[in-house]
Amino acid sequence: MRIVVDAMGSDDYPHPDVAGAVLAAREFGDEIILVGDESRIKTELSQHETAGLRIRVCPAAEVIEMTDKPSVASRSKKDSSMHVGLNLVKQGEADAFVSAGNTGAILAVAMLQTLRRISGVKRPALGVTFPIPTRPLLIDNGANADCQPDYLLQFALMGSLFIERVQGIKQPRVALISNGEEEGKGNTLIKETIPLLAASGLNFIGNIEPKEFMGGAADVGVTDGFTGNIMIKTAEAVAAHLLGLVRTEIMASPLTQLGGLLAKSAFRRVGRALNPDEVGGAPLLGVNGVVIVAHGRSNAYAIKQAVGQARLSVQNDVVGAIRAGLQGIE
Amino acid sequence: MRIVVDAMGSDDYPHPDVAGAVLAAREFGDEIILVGDESRIKTELSQHETAGLRIRVCPAAEVIEMTDKPSVASRSKKDSSMHVGLNLVKQGEADAFVSAGNTGAILAVAMLQTLRRISGVKRPALGVTFPIPTRPLLIDNGANADCQPDYLLQFALMGSLFIERVQGIKQPRVALISNGEEEGKGNTLIKETIPLLAASGLNFIGNIEPKEFMGGAADVGVTDGFTGNIMIKTAEAVAAHLLGLVRTEIMASPLTQLGGLLAKSAFRRVGRALNPDEVGGAPLLGVNGVVIVAHGRSNAYAIKQAVGQARLSVQNDVVGAIRAGLQGIE
């Protein structure tokens, strides 16, 4: 397998991106293609023990920065690491693309400039795996701020196929994320999507609230990209706020400090359980190729995990499954 | 001041509702009117020391249960404690109404059957005070699942007046909750609301993400009721999940258990800081009277705090301010 890693992706590029690529090449034995500024990548690589690893560098002259406007950069920086890397996938010279770069730009370059949509896909969508034990997928997480019921139907299908293929769950439980489970709850979008999902042949279990989703009640939570993004960002903000509060209160007295010290391993396990790095990036579903978007603040481990996520999608032919699945639903 | 407390509101009515009313009568010295099943209320009251307190009972023959469908119950149970209590406010026999009952039913009875909308209000909205130190208001939190830009403009105005009057903050910072702060982010609703808020004369600071809202960047966070409700419910779900995780991991070994024991006071302070009971219920803004909706699982303390919230709204004439403010904005 050949996996492209965007060396100019993360907030701190190319350091974590290259280090993660080295980890991935070592752990998985795959060929990793690092795309970006050749000399910077080589300097970075020289810090690592790479003998015997299948790593090659593919130069790209431009970098799309986090501050770049996606719609502009995707059209003007045609020699960016994203363009070059995604074109390798398009041309069949690589099997997947992993980047921790500007999410909007990755979406724009993948959807509009390089891979393009799978025929029949109305809107590609970004899935995100929730760090709870059952690892459910929330889709869409921000690719589409405005949605229609037929988009949500396709998100459900793509998410369901992803979970089935990558997690090996037969007939994943698909739910709409709503403000209540009762009939009559939800906004117009939700209400109009219900009959489509009920008739879809998917294992649609109805509407659920965030609490049930966090409790593992569904394998796929379907939402418009605006709501999904607010949900993820709220979850991250609350977790950070709460852990900060716990830290402050524990530091407030010598006794509680001692308690915190003794309970340190418990906190470490909590941190690990919630760590988004573990799940390894968000799949962009509905384009002609495997694309995994990692957090901008990814470290090497997170990049390696994202490569792992990409491998699973390739091995289990998620793209082919979506291509075939779309026939069934239309 | 005369404040109605719905004795048949909470999940565990009438126990916490009556006990909270007694606490409120004692702390604030106001007249509390308990509305509901007279004999059950009197039995409950006999458990408390009420000598010298201004508490009276107003009978209501029906109860709207949590499981009742709001649209049906609001029309069919016209002698419910909600109808009777809200009519006392409407007829000027009381100054505010507090209930921990079925939220949808409270809204329906207040908006459609009793108090009705303030003239010029397109849609009343439910505000919720976030349990962070600056106590910002998120509005709407579920009264309106589908919104238009002109509704959000009014939510911003009503929320701003509420914060100004109740918290004494001059020119509260008003922000739209969005999936990004940059121009071009947001769904169509957000994008179309921006120019209205920019021209409103309110202290509009732009779009913010949930993280900034949780960090205290705004005094009023404006959102449609669907997104707002998902945001609140996600925040509650994540907090519960996280604290559960911490508890489980601390119980996992004798050493971490000891640590947890020593740090107990820190956890107690965290719990208190996050306790929604402290903020005392959500104001329904835009109807002709003060209505405070408390959590269904309120205890006596939470009911008392909700009465406190109602008092502040009455003392500072939030309803009058909204009535006057609407003239200015149209």
Image: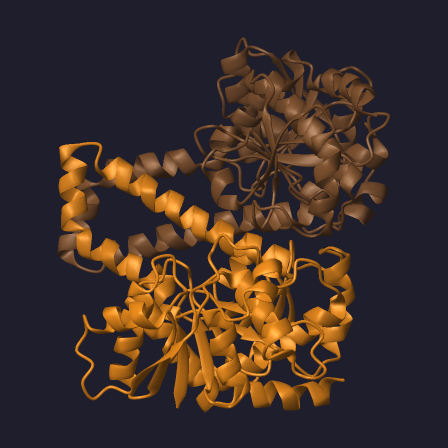
Chain colours: A orange, B brown
Residue A309: image location, x then y, percent: 41, 78
In this rendering, would A272 be left or right of A174? left
Residue B204: image location, x then y, percent: 63, 30
- Residue at x-position 54% and y-position 73%: A284
Quadrant position of residue B156: top right
**A3 vs B112: above or below:** below
Please tell me which residue lies in front, A10 or B153. Answer: A10
**B212 vs A201: above or below:** above
**B64 vs A36: above or below:** above
- Residue at x-position 16% and y-position 43%: A259
Please tell me which residue lies in front, A98 or B15. Answer: A98
**A277 vs B318: above or below:** below
Residue A45: image location, x then y, percent: 24, 73
Quadrant position of residue B170: top right
Q: Is residue A145 visible?
A: yes
Q: Identify the image quadrant of the C terminus of chain A.
A: bottom right
- Residue at x-position 57% and y-position 55%: A69
In this rendering, would B68 be left or right of A312? right
Q: Is residue B81 visible?
A: no
Residue A8: image location, x then y, percent: 39, 66
Q: Identify the image quadrant of the N terminus of chain A.
A: bottom left
Please tell me which residue lies in front, A268 or A10. Answer: A10
In this rendering, would A24 be left or right of B47? left
Please tell me which residue lies in front, A295 or B64. Answer: A295
Q: How many marks?
A: 0
- Residue at x-position 31% and y-position 37%: B268
